[in-house]
Amino acid sequence: MRYLPKSPSERQEMLAAIGVRSVEDLFTSIPEKFRLREPLNLPGPLSETEIIQYFQARAAENARGYTSFLGAGAYQHLRSVAADALIQRGEFLTSYTPYQAEFAQGTLTAIFEFQTLMCQLTGQEVANASMYDGSTALTEAVLMAERLTSRSHVLVARSVHPEYRQVLKTYAKNLGLEIEEIGYTESGQLDRAALKPETLAKAAAVVVQSPNFFGVLEDLPALAEIAHAQSSLLISTITEAVSLGIVRPPAEADIVAMEGQAFGIAPSYGGPYVGVIATREKNVRQMPGRLAGQTTDSTGNRGFVLTLATREQHIRREKATSNICTNEALYALAATIHLCLIGKEGLREQALQNLAKARFAQAEFEKIPGIRRVFSGPTFNEFTLEFPRSVKMINADLLKENIIGPYALGTHYPDLTKRAVVCVTETTPRAEIERFAAAVRRILEKPV
Amino acid sequence: MNSKLTDLEAPTKNVGKARAHVTQNEGLIFEQSAPGKRGMELPPLDVPAVDPAAALGKAFTRDSIEGFPEVSEIEVIRHFTRLSTWNYAIDLGMYPLGSCTMKYNPRVNEFVARLEGLATEHPEQPGEVSQGCLRILYDLQKCLLSITGMDAATLQPAAGAQGELTGLLMIRAYLESQGNARHKVLIPDSAHGTNPASVVIAGYEVQNIKSNSRGQLDTDHLREFVTDDVAALMITNPSTLGVFEERIAEIAAILHERGALLYMDGANMNALAGVTRPGDFGVDVMHLNLHKTFSTPHGGGGPGAGPVMVKKILEPFLPVPVVVQKQDDTYALDHNRPKSVGRVRAYAGNFGVLLRALAYTLAYGPGIRQATEDAVVNANYIRKNLEPYFDLPYNLPSMHEVVFSDARQKARGVNTMDIAKRLIDYGFHPYTTAFPLIVPGAMMIEPTESESKQECDLFIDAMRSIAAEVEANPELVKTAPHSTRVGRLDEVAAARKPILRWKPA
């Protein structure tokens, strides 16, 4: 077997050195009746060529050659060859969590840079590296708010990603955390009138997403003021992080829970991505996840170490801030490299292109009879349309034209079956937007 | 600085398999930034430009991002390449971190994870155009069930710790359906720290139980703890001592008699794959760490994947969605599972990690047993060769890892961390120090099957040489490493006044 570096005679030599006759003798601590006598029922072994053939065959069964207008938490953005090449360097790819700092300064330095970039983008003072994804980052942010405020009620906007809310519910269920959902207005933004002072006074946090699931930006400074008046925290989650290139950073939020996939990470059918929590320095001891800190060695050389580990499970066990251990370090590195490459000007340009293309697409759709744009609040690269009939039916027709249609809100909002969220990024060519709009027009002209 | 350390005076001197080597100094990327440089260009905008302040309103926009890097592509390449040379990696040599299973990460897995049609797929795209992704998930499930002898699986958990939580939530849901969720989960004192942390999030109370003098669970002792208020026992098998719990079936029976369940932390599955199946010895729920046993790269701390396998009785409680094969042989995500514990993360899991694990499994097929055997041979070979030099606190048959202690070296004022740091000078990553907690001064060594006899011999030579240094020149070991870019770093200062981001001077 090509992954195993021993010859048969070396195996024998090693067994002889150990002092056993056969390898079986090394497994005698397993009760006889539980030792397998037959080979496992598994496909393979496959050569490298056959492995590639298997996966190429699977790739051909997917949506290759389709144009997609899906966003809803995972985005098709520019990725660079350089970043992907760098994360495949064995020294990054095949190294462990940098507990032995002297032998892992590469990873630790990159983590420190990641933390810095996340702070610069979010306007926060400290960021961890990292959480599993946006959905668990949000859940951990809520648990963090509960610890910071000693309150167990949470107000969550219905315009937060539905799957993020589901994850929060799963975690909250056994922790005595009470979740109350807050609706949205015509603008698509959180219904501030529903934030009653008496409710806020018992709430650990108000949780919003911006841009939210409908694509609309929330007025974070105003929400922060309302929450803070009752000593509640504001948690802002971000699924479309490229927006930070032009959108006001969530600096007024107390905790930011972000999905970093938009920073050059492939959609990859849902993962691996990279979650991040960013917050104020004063909250850091209640923040979960790994942190790299700057320090020096005895000769004064700058170096980095994992720090504030007394928050973590390997030290505190049941008293830890979280059970997280393995995180998404390689994708934090990928995002770091990507952001260094695209840089200050590039990220802004990318965000502007998203905005311009989304506005172009929006205008194309507004020309189609029967379609109207809903939610009047400001939007970035996603916007919500209302169609004259069920989105699911329209999407089924679009699929026949190699177009993966917009996200059907009816999946999670039973009252919104005719509404869909369209996502357009810098990777969507104008011609595809036009083809998409023309296809929708044709589909709607067809009698039902 | 090392003027007393004679063996390091000559820069070309060999220390075991290693010799000092120039690495380049490199500042932070922010320190190389200058206005107007960039490392990536976009295709020109093919629609009319939009003024953000006009489109969004001035209050919703930002000016440029202060301090954000402006560097060229070559600077980014050099920067991260230089950083990478400051790391150790499996690709450079043995990485004997006990309980971490640092094995070879096959390159073909990286290749297939990047294929157009797999890396490019959106998690919300319709099932009709996701059959390839779903089949990959389904095939992996089948393989993992075959290897573990369990009945049903979820691939959603993002890592081992999330798998633990998922398993515990299912145990809770099952017991609730039986009328009583109960209050306690038992955890042996040798367990990983994630176990108790996960128990708390599942809403249970941790009850720690002591291992006996053989480092194993004492069944009489266990009986006293297993009351009607105990939901489950979380056991790591082989234990963190690398020893198989010989009475595992009896342990399962004790729990089952009182209506409690047996959870197995599969962190050490690398000792068992192809040799024995947890489903056969009484385990009700378990997770696997695909970034350990199934070779997906650790990447400096993640990503991982922590699939959970269960017995039939727990199947209704699996997180949604569940990957299923339909009667027409197509695949789908089943969301309609009324008894489900819910969702533990967005989408269907760390797909890119899961597909790498499938590539690994397909490469071996039933031959995965050979990998297990080689891993166990390596651990026992190292044990045999180091036993004369280091204290072995639990003299029990080792499986995939061996735990020594620094008891002998302590007499010379040298501890496990010092020895670990000295290993770096010999060109090896340290073993796991200070874990498991039941062994004071633990030195936990897991070579995995990926090491040749030659690499094992070099490691043994390094450890023996360090043992000799401890006698002859303990200071040399206590001040190690001597060959890295930085010496021992001041962790206390780092924690006392945390500097957690770069700021412009």
Image (spheres, coloured by chain):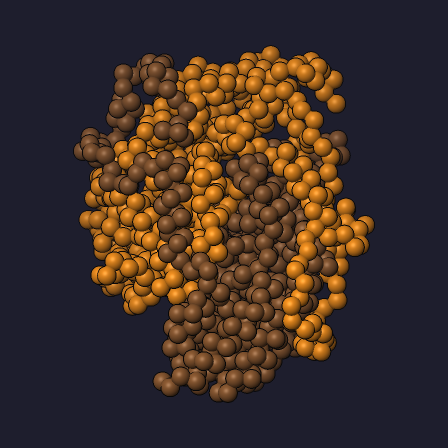
Chain colours: A brown, B orange
Q: Quadrant of the C terminus of chain A?
A: bottom left
Residue B253 % position (x, y): 20, 44
Residue A154 appears in the picture as rendered: no
Residue A401 % position (x, y): 43, 69
Residue ID at (55%, 41%)? A88
Classify B84 as above or below B286: above
Q: As drawn, is A299 to the left or to the right of B277?
A: right
Q: Quadrant of residue B188?
A: top left
Q: Quadrant of the N terminus of chain A?
A: top left
Observer-nearest of B394 and B13: B13
Residue ID at (36%, 23%)? B377
Residue B53 appears in the picture as rendered: yes
Residue B130 % position (x, y): 38, 60
Classify A267 as above or below A243: above
Residue ID at (73%, 52%)? B38
Residue A82 % position (x, y): 62, 46
Classify A367 as above or below A392: below
Q: As drawn, is A58 to the left or to the right of A261?
A: left
Classify B488 as above or below B205: above
Observer-nearest of B259 and B174: B174
Observer-nearest of A220 and A173: A220
